[in-house]
Image (cartoon, rainbow, N blue to C red):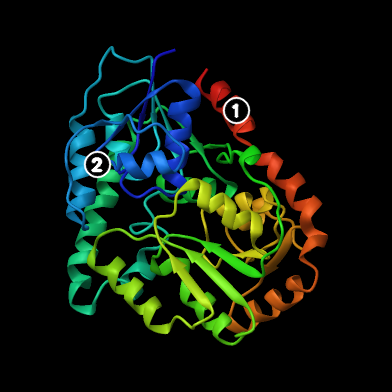
């Protein structure tokens, strides 16, 4: 079967991008994107061969709108047997490229479930009227392009509920892949680890404020951000409140990242209503306990008390309490973590995706 994978942008490699690259590698598919960073793709353990369909700017909203326009014009008629849409802003590629399957990480969050959060926490007050118009316009486009989507698979039950609520469609759940064989548990070197994009709804400031209250403990944050004003503003804010016991790293390659997982005490994440979250799986594959909010996709990937702690109504105080509790004996969670991670292995994902494509 000849397959093509569409992903909006491949110049900043996070979980969603790794899903698209994994699909292309494991299924022998060609992958199409607007912009790509071949060096970063190689550093994350994937082939850098990406078919680019045209440049887009670095900053929103022109970046998203031009990507939408470029995929809308993309027509690969007859070249492939099936097309997999892996990115939210690549959804317009469904119009000319059928049959297709949309793998949904989430309906576009800033126009749907995170609309109010983005408006209040990212958009300056003077830009909010224009933002509202932009949201209404893209909601209409989103619904229009959905008419051309043949089948839908999503990454979690959490995302399935969003697809149903906002777009009126049903979806099959296939959790995203983690290559669990790459990860291992090594000597605890006494630091906690966090891996996330530096964007406001990840709530990384909670981690910084919590560890500022625990100067005897160390935190390493691996975080990258896109080259746009509001991403840079948030990164500057985080740097301004970063205590001395927190180290912030950016654009780390896969071998270094695997090593950081292997030697940490445990893993911390604070993302708001996360779609699913692949980084806790990577931590658990390394035998490390995870501390996460009791919400979103974390409820599907973790077992509270066995693989770490899920914190209701997460706050700085509760995060501190959980770090102290789990940190007393992190080794007790190892076997349960490794066992849980295997449920989300790449081989499981690819087997289910092959079935969905058939």
Q: Nearer the viewer, residue 97 or 324?
A: 324
Q: Position of residue 322 (x, y in %)?
A: 70, 75
Q: Position of residue 177 (x, y in %)?
A: 57, 39
Dot 2 falls on a residue whose secondary structure is loop
Residue drawn at (45%, 43%), measured in percent from left and top? 44
In this rendering, position of residue 346 left or right of residue 338? left
Mark pair 2, 1: CA separation: 29 Å
Res. 35 mark: 2
Q: Give above or below for 60 relative to 105.
A: below
In this rendering, position of residue 287 left or right of residue 283? right
Q: Earlier in the sequence, mark 2 or mark 1?
A: 2
Residue drawn at (28%, 69%), measured in percent from left and top? 232
> Which of the 4 image quadrants contains residue 296?
bottom right
Q: Is residue 278 visible?
A: no
Q: Position of residue 23 (x, y in %)?
A: 47, 30
Residue drawn at (64%, 40%), measured in percent from left and top? 180
């Amino acid at each position: 079967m000849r397959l093509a994978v569409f992903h909006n942008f491949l110049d900043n490699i996070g979980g969603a991008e790794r899903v698209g690259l994994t699909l292309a590698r494991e299924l022998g598919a060609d992958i199409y994107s607007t912009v790509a960073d071949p060096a970063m793709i190689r550093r994350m353990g994937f082939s850098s061969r990406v078919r680019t369909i045209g440049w887009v700017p670095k900053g929103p909203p022109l970046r998203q709108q031009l990507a939408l326009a470029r995929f809308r014009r993309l027509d690969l008629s007859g070249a492939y047997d099936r097309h997999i849409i892996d990115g939210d802003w690549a959804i317009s590629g469904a119009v000319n490229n059928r049959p297709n399957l949309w793998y949904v990480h989430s309906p576009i969050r800033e126009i749907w479930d995170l609309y109010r959060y983005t408006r209040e926490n990212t958009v300056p007050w003077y830009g909010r009227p224009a933002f509202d118009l932009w949201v209404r316009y893209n909601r209409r486009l989103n619904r229009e392009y959905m008419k051309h989507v043949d089948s839908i698979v999503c990454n979690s039950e959490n995302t399935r509920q969003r697809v149903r609520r906002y777009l009126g469609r049903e979806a099959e759940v296939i959790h995203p892949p983690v290559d669990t064989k790459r990860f291992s548990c090594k000597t605890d070197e006494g630091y906690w680890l966090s891996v996330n994009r530096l964007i406001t709804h990840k709530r990384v400031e909670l981690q910084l404020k919590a560890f500022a209250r625990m100067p005897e403990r160390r935190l390493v944050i691996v975080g990258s951000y896109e080259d746009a004003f509001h991403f840079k503003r948030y990164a500057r804010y985080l740097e301004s409140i970063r205590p001395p016991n927190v180290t912030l790293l950016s654009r780390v390659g896969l071998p270094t990242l695997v090593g950081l997982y292997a030697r940490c005490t445990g893993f911390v994440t604070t993302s708001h209503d996360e779609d699913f979250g692949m980084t806790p799986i990577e931590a658990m594959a390394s035998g490390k306990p995870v501390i996460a909010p009791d919400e979103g996709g974390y409820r599907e990937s973790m077992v509270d008390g066995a693989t770490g702690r899920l914190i209701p109504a997460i706050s700085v105080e509760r995060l501190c309490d959980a770090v102290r509790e789990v940190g007393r004996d992190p080794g007790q969670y190892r076997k349960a973590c490794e066992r849980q991670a295997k449920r989300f292995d790449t081989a499981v994902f690819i087997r289910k995706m092959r079935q969905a494509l058939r």
